[in-house]
């Protein structure tokens, strides 16, 4: 599990309750990754940390008797971005390859100004907790320079080649500036020949996954997650 927070905030301590709930609701072990944060450590530092942890897990050096095919990458928001980038990096480096990934309202693009091609940035970018302005600030803090923003490991949506990616479950929120880019990334993955499921959580706001287990949007999400995990391990 790779936590969100715009590559700048949050920690595994803040996500302990979420990870415990995830383990309980899915019956899976959850390994939470503490990665370096911007602006002290800019791109690709955090991604390199996530890659190093994943490589260790998939090699079996960290947890014995864990089959690589039973490991699932999962992350929310910026953590979803890091999962998607990690999967691209794994394919390109050839050292291991995730079989499944779950991207919860992921950030996949590099621009949250008025130039964004995604309507949800404009429709949902001002009236909710996560604004387009905040996302642009996070992006600017994460990038070292303009060139970083053109890197597919920074913004997976812009990758030219999305073939040979893991089976993917994407959950988006109806009222979220990131909604359209998450769904568009799923569509591009599908067009590249990958197995993809996309579910938009009706009436949900960005960050809902941190709410209590009894919250309906969280329950709906775990229904999709468990179905996805069961389907793909048969």
Image (cartoon, rainbow, N blue to C red):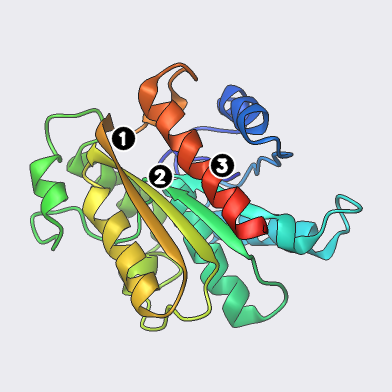
Quick one: SS at disc 3? helix
Q: Are marks 2 and 1 in contact (CB under 8 Å)?
A: yes
On screen, residue 171 versus residue 62, left or right, reads left
**Placement of the C terminus among the 4 image quadrants:** bottom right
| Residue 233 location, quadrant | bottom right
Residue under label 3: 226
- The percent position of residue 186, horizontal first and vertical second, equals 35, 63
Residue 128 can be seen, yes or no: yes
On screen, residue 59 versus residue 83, left or right, reads right
Residue drawn where x is 58% and y is 55% of the image: 231
**Placement of the N terminus among the 4 image quadrants:** top right
Q: Nearer the viewer, residue 219 or 130?
A: 219
Mark 2 or 1, nearer chain start: 2
Q: Residues within 10 Å of mark 1 (few under 14, many from 20)?
A: many
- The percent position of residue 193, horizontal first and vertical second, equals 43, 79
Quick one: SS at disc 1? loop
Q: Nearer the viewer, residue 136 or 97?
A: 97
Residue drawn where x is 35% and y is 59% of the image: 108
| Residue 67 location, quadrant | bottom right
Q: Are marks 3 and 2 in contact (CB under 8 Å)?
A: no
Mark 3 or 2, nearer chain start: 2
Q: CA distance from mark 3 to mark 2?
A: 20 Å
Q: Which residue sits furthest right?
A: 64
Q: Nearer the viewer, residue 52 or 227?
A: 227
Q: CA distance from mark 3 to mark 1?
A: 21 Å
- The percent position of residue 175, horizontal first and vertical second, equals 20, 36
Residue under label 1: 206
Q: Which numbered mark, 3 or 2, is in the foreground of this view?
A: 3
Residue under label 2: 77
Residue 38 can be seen, yes or no: no
């Amino acid at each position: 599990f790779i936590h969100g927070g715009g590559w700048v905030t949050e920690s595994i301590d803040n996500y302990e309750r979420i990870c415990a709930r995830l383990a309980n609701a899915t019956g899976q072990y959850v390994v939470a990754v503490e990665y370096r944060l911007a602006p002290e450590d800019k791109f690709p530092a955090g991604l390199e940390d996530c890659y190093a942890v994943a490589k260790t897990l998939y090699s079996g050096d960290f947890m014995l008797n864990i089959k690589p095919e039973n490991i699932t990458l999962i992350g929310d928001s910026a953590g979803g971005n890091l999962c998607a980038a990690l999967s691209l990096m794994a394919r390109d480096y050839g050292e291991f390859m995730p079989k499944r990934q779950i991207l919860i309202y992921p950030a996949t693009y590099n621009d949250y100004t008025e130039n964004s091609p995604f309507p949800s940035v404009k429709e949902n970018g001002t009236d909710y907790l996560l604004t387009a302005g905040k996302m642009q600030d996070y992006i600017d803090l994460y990038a070292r320079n303009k060139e970083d923003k053109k890197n597919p490991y920074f913004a997976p949506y812009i990758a030219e080649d999305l073939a040979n990616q893991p089976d993917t479950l994407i959950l988006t929120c109806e009222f979220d500036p990131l909604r359209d880019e998450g769904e568009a990334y799923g569509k591009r993955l599908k067009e590249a020949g990958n197995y993809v499921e996309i579910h938009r959580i009706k009436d949900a706001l960005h960050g809902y996954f941190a709410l209590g287990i009894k919250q309906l949007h969280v329950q709906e999400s775990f229904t999709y997650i468990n179905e996805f995990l069961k389907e793909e391990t048969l």
